[in-house]
Image (spheres, rainbow, N blue to C red):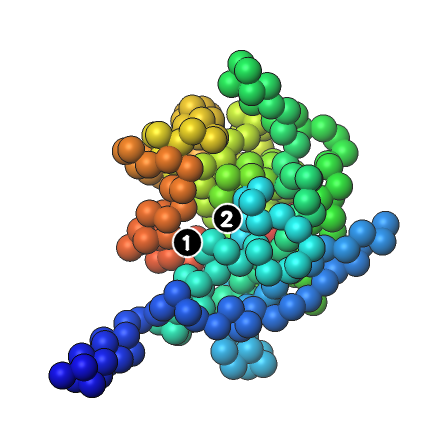
Amino acid sequence: MLRFILLLLTLWSASLPWSAAQDLSLYQYRHFVGATGDTLPYRILLPKNYASGKRYPLLLFLHGAGERGRDNALQLTHGASLFIRPDVRAKYPAIVVFPQCPKDQYWASVVREPQRQHWDFPLWETPGAPMALLLEWLDALVQQERVDARRLYVAGLSMGGMGTFELLARQPHRFAAAIPICGGGNALAVPLYARHTALWVFHGDADAVVPVALSRKMVQAIRAAGGRVRYTEYANVNHDSWTPAFAEPDLLKWLFSQRLKGNARY
């Protein structure tokens, strides 16, 4: 009887389209060294049959504060398993990259006053060190790999959602689509990119870490600027709205259908 149960469990697990035990080593280990000597660790997933001569969409994924470091591994904690699913790789061949932000630094410029629950996102002329290195690396990566410049996408969660909004503001003609999850940004900068980039914004209304008001404010600004934005707010969800966001059945179909109109400029 025990052997029969074990057999059933084995057959059931084999029938699943993906599993949490997937091999994240499919993401190659790489490092980028910038002009100042700073190093950006990143992991990259290349499409199957990559040397076919085609050009592919590029998805940049920005992790949250809990995945910062230098191990070039923690940044794969959330989201990476989605893109190595065999069905996803077959249907949406793409270059997927996960850079890693150093400890005690942030993708975006953020000024927070916890006692007042006040968040500010100054858009200084000179970006912070992680954002500056990210921009330099992205330029090099687009030249190095077989990237379709009309299909660049950026997604991020929490700190990475904030980085997503700042990246759009700094390179407003570059990204065809963006997915900021439980983040926030500078609403005054929204008109720079609102008409160029399609956005799908996610947040949980019970988020105790990053207030949902930050996403609501950005969505309102995008709509006021004439932008294309979808907004999904999850009821009774705390600071892990990425979990239901990654499970949205139309997420990848929506993302990979987006293309820049005209020529990409940055």
Q: Position of residue 48 (x, y in %)?
A: 50, 78
- Residue furthest top in the image: 116
Q: CA distance from mark 1 to mark 2?
A: 10 Å
| Marking on residue 57 | none
Residue under circle 1?
255
Whether residue 58 is visible, yes or no, is no
Helix, strand, or loop for circle 2? strand
Residue 227, image x, y percentages = 44, 34
Q: Residue furthest left?
A: 1
Secondary structure type for disc 1? helix
At a point 45% along the width and 41% down the height, the residue shown is: 181
Taking the image as shown, residue 144 lies to the left or right of residue 208, namely: right
Residue 200 at x, y = what percent? Answer: 40, 42
State whether residue 125 appears in this view: yes
Query: Mark 2 Cα within 10 Å, few/some/many (few <14, many 20+)?
Result: many
Rendered location of residue 244, percent (x, y): 33, 47
Residue at screen point 53% across, 14% down: 116
Q: Residue furthest right?
A: 36
Q: Report crowding for label 1: few under 14, some 14 to 19, many 20 or more residues within 10 A (C-alpha).
A: many
Instruction: Please give the residue where the numbered disc 2 appears in the rendered image.
Output: 155
Which residue, as the protein is rendered here, is positioned at the far front? 2
Q: Nearer the viewer, residue 199 or 1?
A: 1
User: Residue at (73%, 36%) from the top-left corner?
Assistant: 127
Q: Amino acid at mark 2?
A: Ala
Circles 1 and 2, Cβ within 8 Å, touching? The answer is yes
